[in-house]
Image (spheres, rainbow, N blue to C red):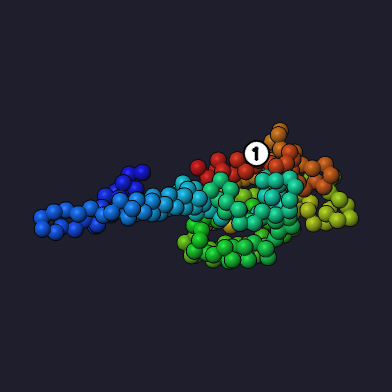
Amino acid sequence: MEKVYSVIIAMIVSFVTVTSGNVKLPEPEKLAEAVESAAAETATAEQKAVEEPKQKGYGRILFVGDSRSVDMFTGDTNEVLGQNIDGMTVYCRDGAQYKDMVPWIESYGIDNFDTLVTWMGCNNFGDFSEYGPYYDSLLAKGKTIVACTVGPTVDECLLIDVDYLYYPNANQIKYNNSLVAWANERGVKIIDLYSYISNSSTVTVSETDGIHYFPQPTTELWNYIKANLK
């Protein structure tokens, strides 16, 4: 409210005219309109400040992920695109790969975020080769990257005819080894969700597909990511 009062005082001063030694104040109706306008502008500015997705030390954060990320927020939809969740703008979708991540980032706008938090890779079947060069391009533009390791899968629960060839736990380990090696060479922060989930007694891997986690929404994982950004 101090800002509003300051604006009001400034407006009163600007309205004042001195004639024949007398000070003439603005008409009550015009003053009321000026006060209302100043209050509305201040409220709008304060609301924008509250809504802007920022996290202490990381500026404006963009988060990207695949279906496991979707599951952190909801158990009954297949995507979360452009939502502001706990101060971060979130893009994630079932089955998302590298080819989905890049258009999200480019369409959102490189100049509209300071930090990229990424939990990608499961659907690239152990292959980190495309991610590294793209992340390097973001670092070269002054962006900060925080990368989450891909979570584990349970081989004996994978669907033999569909998932077994693409999602064995060996692929998750292969991807993570490449990711961590890349990050260590550049001083990029890693959030080790693979170890956290593997050691958790409260987050479990689906016995139906061996890939996704329960209970959904897996809020615990989202909270773990946020805790590592403090």
Task: Identify the residue under disc 1.
Answer: 220
Question: Depth check: 180 or 213 in front?
Answer: 213
Residue 51 point in image, percent of width and height: 50, 50
Q: Is residue 51 left or right of residue 14?
A: right
The x and y percentages for residue 90 are 61, 53
The answer to whether 198 appears left or right of 116 in the picture is right
Does the rendering let one see residue 205? yes
Is any atom of residue 172 visible in this view? no
In this view, which residue lies farthest toward the top? 201
Q: Position of residue 38 (x, y in %)?
A: 36, 53
Q: Residues within 10 Å of mark 1 (few under 14, many from 20)?
A: some
Residue at 69% from the left image edge and 41% from the top image edge: 218
Q: What is the quadrant of the N terminus in the image? A: top left
Q: Nearer the viewer, residue 35 or 165?
A: 35
Q: Residue furthest right?
A: 161
Q: Residue at x 69, y 50 (%)?
A: 70
* Residue type marked 1: Glu
Residue drawn at x 70%, y 60% is 97
Q: Which x, y percent locates residue 32?
A: 34, 51
Compared with 108, 4 (above or below) is above
Instruction: Label 1: state its secondary structure.
Output: helix
